[in-house]
């Protein structure tokens, strides 16, 4: 660590966050705060991780469900085995699938890590673009005030590159519109952020992962997905460690939570300059109406699905 960054943690903790009002009003001073302190915050997370290395877990793929890990590993070695990965995902409606994503035996360690993050006293940005949510943190380097801890970033990018992207290509046909990543954590609580109105996502694919522990029950907070083919709405409830992957164009909404708390990681894929496939007309407005949509009908090989794009990351962020 350089002399310039050796006291970054102390400097970061001394910063005064922009007010919630100025943040919600998108005041220019808010972006200035995050941009002018970006280097300090990045060094602070690195220093925090080093200072706490003896007590915080090292995140890696062993936190994910062992059956999922095995089938994904096999598919990377031989993409012709990708059907075993697809078979793990249960179809809820066309374009929406679910499976066990986190290993329940490791989920508490993961939550312990996130609890340590929340207690780090390093300024971070909540996902205000999602109905003004008060909790959670931005996860991707394209976002202001993101969780820049090096180990977390390594885990996050491994999850996106090795798991989400090839699975989205396999189930949702997103190839060519999945080069860019985005993510945030979010909480639902009866006394604060209760629900989320019907919307679509500015993504090619969304992976929504519940990180509640087995003994952390909640009521309400069901998620409705609208099936454009049948015209019906299908309701589902998250279970601990469960993930739902869906096309961003599928309309969905969250019912009010009535007791307990639901905690989730939400990650998106989309193309360069925020391009997404446009397969169907949409009765709902996207969170980001300016996103570019591109019609696609990809016919690609398993080897192409199980590959990592070599295009650079861009600076576009949905919110």
Image (cartoon, helix red, strand yellow):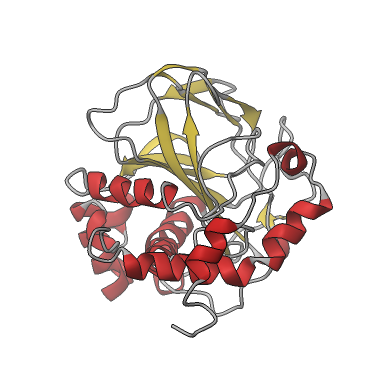
Q: Nearer the viewer, residue 258 or 71?
A: 258
For residue 82, side relative to residue 310 (left or right): left
Q: Nearer the viewer, residue 183 or 177?
A: 183
Split into 4 quadrants, where in the image is the N terminus?
Answer: bottom left
For residue 161, side relative to residue 268 (left or right): left
Expressed as whole percent of the image width and height from the top left, the position of residue 151 reads 37, 67
Decide: is 284 above or below 136. above
Q: Is residue 175 visible?
A: no
Q: Residue at x 25, y 45 (%)?
A: 107
Q: Residue at x 46, y 55 (%)?
A: 168
- Counting the numbered discs, the total is 0
Decide: is 101 above or below 300. above
Expressed as whole percent of the image width and height from the top left, the position of residue 159 reads 39, 61
Decide: is 206 above or below 237. below
| Quarter-of-image position of residue 301 | bottom left
Expressed as whole percent of the image width and height from the top left, the position of residue 219 reads 38, 17
Expressed as whole percent of the image width and height from the top left, the position of residue 136 reads 50, 43
Q: Residue at x 55, y 26 (%)?
A: 193
Q: Residue at x 77, y 42 (%)?
A: 22
Q: Nearer the viewer, residue 278 or 150?
A: 150
């Amino acid at each position: 660590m350089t002399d310039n960054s050796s006291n970054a943690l102390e400097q970061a903790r001394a910063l005064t966050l922009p007010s919630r009002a100025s943040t919600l009003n998108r005041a220019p001073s808010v972006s200035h705060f995050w941009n002018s302190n970006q280097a300090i915050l990045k060094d602070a997370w690195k220093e925090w991780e080093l200072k706490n290395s003896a007590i915080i877990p090292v995140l890696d793929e062993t936190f994910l469900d062992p059956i999922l890990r095995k089938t994904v590993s096999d598919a990377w070695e031989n993409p012709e085995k990708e059907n075993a990965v697809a078979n793990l995902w249960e179809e809820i409606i066309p374009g929406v699938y679910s499976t066990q994503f986190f290993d329940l035996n490791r989920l508490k360690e993961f939550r312990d890590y996130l609890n340590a993050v929340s207690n780090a006293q390093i300024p971070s940005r909540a996902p205000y673009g999602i109905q003004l949510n008060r909790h959670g943190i931005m996860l991707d380097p394209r976002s202001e005030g993101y969780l820049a801890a090096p180990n977390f970033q390594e885990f996050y990018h491994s999850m996106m590159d090795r798991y989400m992207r090839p699975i989205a290509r396999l189930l949702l046909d997103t190839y060519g519109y999945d080069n860019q990543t985005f993510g945030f954590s979010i909480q639902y609580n009866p006394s604060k952020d209760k629900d989320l109105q019907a919307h679509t996502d500015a993504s090619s694919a969304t992976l929504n992962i519940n990180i509640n522990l087995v003994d952390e029950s909640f009521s309400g907070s069901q998620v409705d997905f609208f099936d454009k083919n049948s015209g019906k709405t299908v309701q589902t409830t998250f279970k601990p460690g469960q993930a739902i992957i869906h096309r961003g164009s599928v309309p969905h909404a969250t019912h009010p939570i009535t007791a307990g708390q639901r905690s989730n990681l939400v990650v998106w894929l989309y193309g360069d300059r925020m391009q997404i496939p446009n397969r169907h007309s949409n009765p709902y407005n996207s969170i980001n109406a300016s996103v570019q949509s591109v019609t696609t009908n990809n016919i690609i090989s398993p080897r192409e699905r199980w590959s990592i794009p070599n295009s650079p990351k861009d600076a576009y962020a949905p919110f």
